[in-house]
Amino acid sequence: MNELAEEFRQRTKLLALAVIRFYQTLPKTDEARILGKQLLRAATSTAANYRAATRGRSGAEFYAKLSIAVEEADETCFWLELLKEAEICSTEQLEPLITQSEAIRGFLAKSRSTLRARSKRS
């Protein structure tokens, strides 16, 4: 595995850990728990699927797992947006997570687009 892939694996894992810690601070209301669990699942799934992608046995397997990671990263952004717009958490708490999740989503989506373009040229 190349250095960039390993660095990005760590980055997705760090976001998952930050979301776990954030989840532990959520208010103990039904809506916070429901949205928080969805966020927790999506963020950890992003990291897990990217990790699986880097261990893929073929280009097709890598692309499939990367596609799932893109979807989960987008879902992570969605749950963070909902928590913010519903005013369940402060903007100050959410902004670092939103910024990081948007960056990860962008990187993953760009990687998938690059792979798709390469496969069409082959």
Image: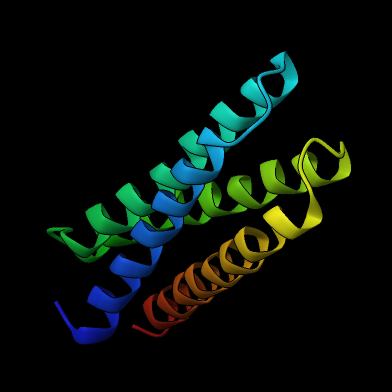
Q: Is residue 72 left or right of residue 74?
A: left
Taking the image as shown, residue 23 lies to the left or right of residue 33, namely left
Colour scheme of this structure image? Answer: rainbow
Depth order, front residue of 83/25: 25
* Residue shown at the point (40%, 43%) measured from the top left: 45
Residue 105 position in % (x across, y down): 56, 64
Give x and y (percent) for residue 9. 29, 66
Q: Quadrant of the N terminus?
A: bottom left
Asked whether, in this view, residue 22 is left or right of residue 99, the answer is left
Residue 98 versus residue 35 in the image, above or below: below
Which corner quadrant of the image does residue 99 belong to? bottom right
Residue at image point 45% right, 75% down? 111
Quadrant where the image shows the C terminus: bottom left
Give the residue at x 50% y 47%: 19
Please state which of residues 97 and 115 is positioned toward the viewer in this rendering.
Answer: 97
Q: Residue at x 41, y 85 (%)?
A: 121
In the rendered image, the vertical position of residue 114 relative to residue 11, given as above or below: below
Drawn side of residue 38 relative to residue 15, left or right? right
Q: Count the marks: how many? A: 0
Q: Is residue 75 above or below residue 58?
A: above
Q: Position of residue 53 (x, y in %)?
A: 27, 58
Q: Position of residue 23 (x, y in %)?
A: 54, 36
The one of 19 and 4 positioned closer to us in this rendering: 19
As displayed, is residue 32 above or below residue 30?
A: below
